[in-house]
Every structure is written in C-alpha cells, then in structure tokens.
C-alpha cells in the first residue's frame, strides 16, 4: 500500500522552482503556513502585508499612502502593490521559486502575476486555498500577537508564548497589529468577500486551486499542504 508523504524534517531534495500562492480570508493561517513552506524549501516568503507594514513603519511615501487604508481594513490599490511585488521577484533570491502570502488579492493582481511569471519562465503556480469558518477567524485574529524582532506568530488562545508578551525564540516584544482589533475584522472580511473571493473561481477554472481545511491544527494543515504539493507536482 502506498504511504502518504509526510513533511520532511530537512530541506527536500527537489527545488521548488515555482510560485506557491496562499489564498484565504484574514486569519486563515496563510502567514503561519507560508513561512513554514518557504523555510522548508529555502525560498523567500513574500507577504505583501509585511512589505506594506514595513513601508508604514519606515514612513516612506508608499507607507504614508497605505497606512490609513490598512487601518480601515480595506485593500491598498493594485498599482502600489504590483510595483512592490514586481521589484521583489526580480531579486536573485527568487530564482528557485517563492511563496506568496496575501497576494494576489484581486483578479487584476492575479492576471498581472500570471504575465509576470510567464515572462520570468516559471511553471504555473500552485494555489493553496485555506478554508475556515468565520467564528474561528475572529478568535485567530483577535488572539494574534507577532514578535517585533523575528516576526514569529503567536496566538493567545491557541499558541501562547511561554512568557507573556515575549517571543519564545528571541525574547522580542510581541505586538498586536492595529487592524487586528475586533471592529476592523468586519471590514477586512467584507473586502475579502468582495475583492478576493472571486479569485477562488478564477484559479479553479485554470485548474490551479487546491482546497485545504485550515480549521485543523497547524501541524495537520502543514501535512495537508505538503500532500497537496506532491499531488500537484505531476499535474501542472
Ligand atoms: P495581510 O497582512 O495580508 O493580512 P490578511 O490577509 O488579512 O491575513 P492575516 O495576516 O490577518 O492572516 P493569515 O491568514 O496570514 O493568518 P496567520 O497565519 O497570521 O494584509 C493586511 C492588509 O494589508 C490588508 O488588509 C490590506 O490593507 C493590505 N494588503 C496586503 N496585501 C495586499 C494586496 N495584495 N493588495 C491590496 N492590499 C493588500 O494566523 C492568524 C492567527 O491564527 C495567528 O495568531 C496564528 O498563530 C493562528 N493560527 C494560524 N494557523 C492556526 C491553526 N492551524 N490552528 C490554530 N491557530 C492558528
């Protein structure tokens, strides 16, 4: 009997050599899983949310424009996001593939990405669609705390740090994102339903979408993603 592949402890022997896209509502676990997968393959984890937050923290012109939009839980304009993504994937560290988290978020972004990947000679992407109930989303978002130093993600209900307010790995201070307040979760979910959910049909039509049950534990979701990638490898 064939056994299901399990997530290897070490770096897999084969290169990723493609883009993996994590698609799902706020709090579904895109960042948590995208980081793990990128580390496993030693490829960059490209979170447009993190890139935008960095611009906000540095007070760049882009950050100044993005800050109020992000704080309202709305999407930043396609033109701003596409510019930072196009620049980022030009860098040499992306030559063996990369893992997107929170991008693309609109059909226009997906179409642009499709062209960009073709231009760079990549295979078609694998899209991991994380499915989760709204009740769980609220718990995951309001409980999330992130390390200011290393970016490690915690959850006060599901995965609390050993010492309150401090990262287990590097002792960095844990902070709550301004858009993780309960009153901003509604607008973020509405933006997802209106602007991002159409991507589910878009990628399904292209035969690139793979559903994963994101309500399970971090380890179980990681296993499902790993199996999905193995199955997708031969198909597209
Ligand atoms: P972004 O940073 O992308 O946020 P998001 O999509 O709303 O997603 P989140 O980061 O909230 O959740 P996640 O799915 O990554 O969950 P996580 O793994 O952290 O975007 C922020 C803003 O930036 C947007 O609103 C927009 O303004 C702008 N923006 C970004 N990209 C854009 C784009 N492309 N176009 C336009 N605007 C853009 O997990 C959540 C919590 O759950 C954590 O506490 C974690 O520990 C816990 N958890 C995760 N998995 C599990 C599990 N399996 N079991 C138990 N707990 C779990």
Image (cartoon, rainbow, N blue to C red):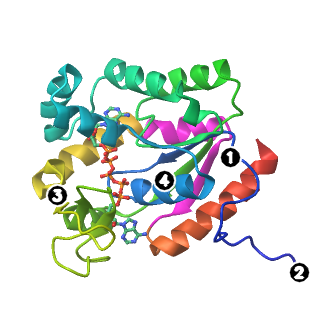
Which label's residue is closer to the chain start, 4 or 2? Answer: 2
Which label's residue is closer to the chain start, 3 or 4? Answer: 4
Q: Circle 3 — which element? A: loop
Please report the bounds of the magenta region as a residue range. Answer: 197-214
Q: Residues within 10 Å of mark 1 (few under 14, many from 20)?
A: many
Left or right of residue 47: residue 6:
right
> Mark 4 = which residue?
34
The residue at the point 60 percent across, 69 percent down is: 223
Q: Are marks 4 and 1 in contact (CB under 8 Å)?
A: no
Which label's residue is closer to the chain start, 1 or 2? Answer: 2
Q: Quadrant of residue 82?
A: top left
Q: Quadrant of residue 75?
A: top left
The residue at the point 86 percent across, 75 percent down is: 2
Of badges 1 and 2, nearer the viewer stands 1
Q: Does the beta carbon at disc 2 come under 8 Å from ligand 1?
A: no
Q: x, y (%) of residue 150?
A: 32, 57
| Residue 176 numbered mark, or none | 3
Q: Is residue 159 above or below residue 222?
A: below
Q: Quadrant of residue 55?
A: top left
Whether 212 is among the magenta residues is: yes
Q: Circle 2 — which element? A: loop
Left or right of residue 64: residue 49:
right
Left or right of residue 77: residue 187:
left
Q: Does the beta carbon at disc 4 come under 8 Å from ligand 1?
A: yes
Distance in Å between CA atoms under marks 4 and 2: 31 Å
């Amino acid at each position: 009997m064939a056994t299901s592949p399990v997530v290897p402890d070490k770096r897999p022997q084969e290169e990723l050599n493609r883009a993996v896209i994590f698609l799902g509502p706020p709090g579904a676990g895109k960042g948590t899983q995208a980081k793990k997968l990128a580390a496993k393959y030693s490829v960059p984890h490209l979170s447009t949310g993190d890139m935008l937050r960095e611009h906000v923290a540095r007070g760049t012109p882009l950050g100044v424009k993005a800050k109020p939009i992000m704080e309202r839980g709305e999407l930043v304009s396609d033109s701003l996001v596409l510019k930072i993504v196009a620049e980022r994937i030009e860098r040499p560290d992306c030559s063996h593939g990369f893992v997107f988290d929170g991008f693309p978020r609109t059909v226009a972004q997906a179409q642009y990405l499709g062209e960009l990947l073709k231009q760079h000679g990549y295979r078609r992407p694998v899209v991991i669609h994380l499915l989760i109930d709204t009740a769980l989303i609220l718990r995951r978002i309001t409980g999330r705390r992130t390390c200011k130093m290393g970016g490690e993600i915690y959850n006060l209900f599901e995965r609390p740090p050993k010492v309150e307010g401090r990262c287990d790995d590097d002792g960095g201070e844990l902070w709550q994102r301004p858009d993780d307040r309960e009153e901003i979760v509604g607008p973020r979910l509405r933006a997802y339903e209106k602007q991002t959910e159409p991507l589910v049909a878009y990628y399904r039509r292209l035969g690139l979408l793979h559903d994963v049950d994101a309500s399970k534990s971090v380890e179980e979701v990681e296993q499902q993603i790993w199996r999905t990638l193995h199955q997708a490898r031969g198909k597209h």
